[in-house]
Amino acid sequence: MTTPHTASIIDGNALSAQLRADVMRRAMALKARGITPGLAVVLVGDNPASQVYVRNKVKACADAGLHSVLERYDADMSEAALLARIDALNQDPSIHGILVQLPVPKHIDANKVIEAIAPEKDVDGFHIASAGALMVGQPGFLPCTPYGCMKMLESIGYDLRGKHAVVIGRSNIVGKPMAMLLLQKNATVTICHSATADLKAMTLQADVIVAAVGKVNVLTADMVKPGAVVIDVGMNRNAQGKLCGDVDYAGVREVAGHITPVPGGVGPMTITMLLVNTLESAERLV
Ligand code: NAP
């Protein structure tokens, strides 16, 4: 009798715990030299999901021995007032990373806000200077979610050279930087999106699939080549209200070689890489 195949799980919680222990050690070493890495998290408005995200980020900082400040403002805060706060944080020597939780209210131009953050404190990696640095292969802050996905691939010792990676989604914060990072590691990269004519034809060729769409069951078992590595960035609610990814986990797990779960996959890694970026921003000062 043959045992049914199931993919190895890439455990984002376990990997995060390892990486966060390293952040904590390095933060202590910095503290001994008089520098406490500090993150400022700015939240405008009362979006319930954003409130959960910022709370998790602030807690993760505290757990890893990083200083953090949470600045919360009413939804009617003016753009000028927000830009002034960012300017003050840019000048504040106790702050090494600044994060403005997106989305901001409609009357505020998110691009203007991101560009107001000093590039040397842009730990989210969304500033055009960070995006440009990634594009041309210069050092800079990497956006936390794709950075976390790369760490997950690294954790299984996966060599991307010559492999075909398919990224589903082309947002500035996930899909596009993900594709650039895979390309940097010598993968052949295909980027799919809502106008892709035959998604399944693309994904069936892939050695690595990163799903970053925001829709349940975008990737099902019939779309995956046996043994492929599947990374699920999506965060959705299913019909029962349970958190789930873009991937039909139960089905794809029977075909893939490795798979990331939701929850417990990319989500914790995103916060972990935010801690890493903040720490490394502070380390640049010594
Ligand atoms: P986004 O800006 O909405 O981008 C979604 C992308 O998916 C777009 O490029 C869109 O194509 C593409 N798309 C939509 N429907 C498609 C389809 N049927 N087939 C192929 N592509 C399709 O979203 P995002 O900010 O990148 O986030 C994606 C997902 O990741 C969301 O669920 C989000 O909650 C989650 N997320 C998770 C984390 C984490 O830490 N786990 C972090 C960030 C985001 P077009 O460009 O053509 O519209």
Image (cartoon, helix red, strand yellow):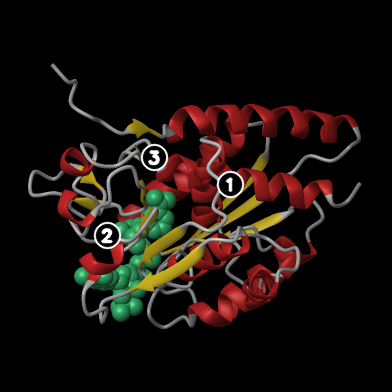
Relative side of 269 to 140, left or right: left
Q: Amino acid at mark 3?
A: Gly
Looking at the image, which residue is at 46% across and 80% down?
A: 108
Residue at the spot of label 1: 273
Task: Depth check: give the residue in front, 77 or 192.
Answer: 192
Q: Is mark 3 within 8 Å of ligand 1?
A: yes
Tell me if residue 42 comes above or below residue 155 in the rendering. Answer: below
Dot in front, 2 or 3: 2
Tell me if residue 235 comes above or below residue 131 in the rendering. Answer: above
Tally of marks: 3
Distance from disc 2 to disc 3, alpha carbons, whole Å, reads: 23 Å
Q: Amino acid at mark 1?
A: Met
Residue at the spot of label 3: 265
User: Can you see residue 28?
Assistant: yes
Q: Secondary structure at mark 1?
A: helix
Quarter that holds the N terminus: top left
Position of residue 139 measured from the top left corner of the image (x, y, whole percent): 75, 63
Label annotation for residue 204: 2
Few, some or many residues within 10 Å of mark 1 (<14, 14–19, 20+): many
Q: Amino acid at mark 2?
A: Leu
Ligand 1 rendered quadrant: bottom left
Residue contact at pointers 2 and 3, CB within 8 angstroms: no
Judged from this view, the residue extending furthest toward the top is: 1
Few, some or many residues within 10 Å of mark 2 (<14, 14–19, 20+): some
Picture quadrant where residue 99 is located: bottom right
Q: Which tag, 2 or 3, sits closer to the chain's start?
A: 2
Q: Which tag, 1 or 3, sits closer to the chain's start?
A: 3
Tell me if residue 109 comes above or below residue 156 in the rendering. Answer: below
Position of residue 121 measured from the top left corner of the image (x, y, whole percent): 71, 61
Looking at the image, which residue is at 23% across and 29% down?
A: 5
Picture quadrant where residue 144 is located: bottom right
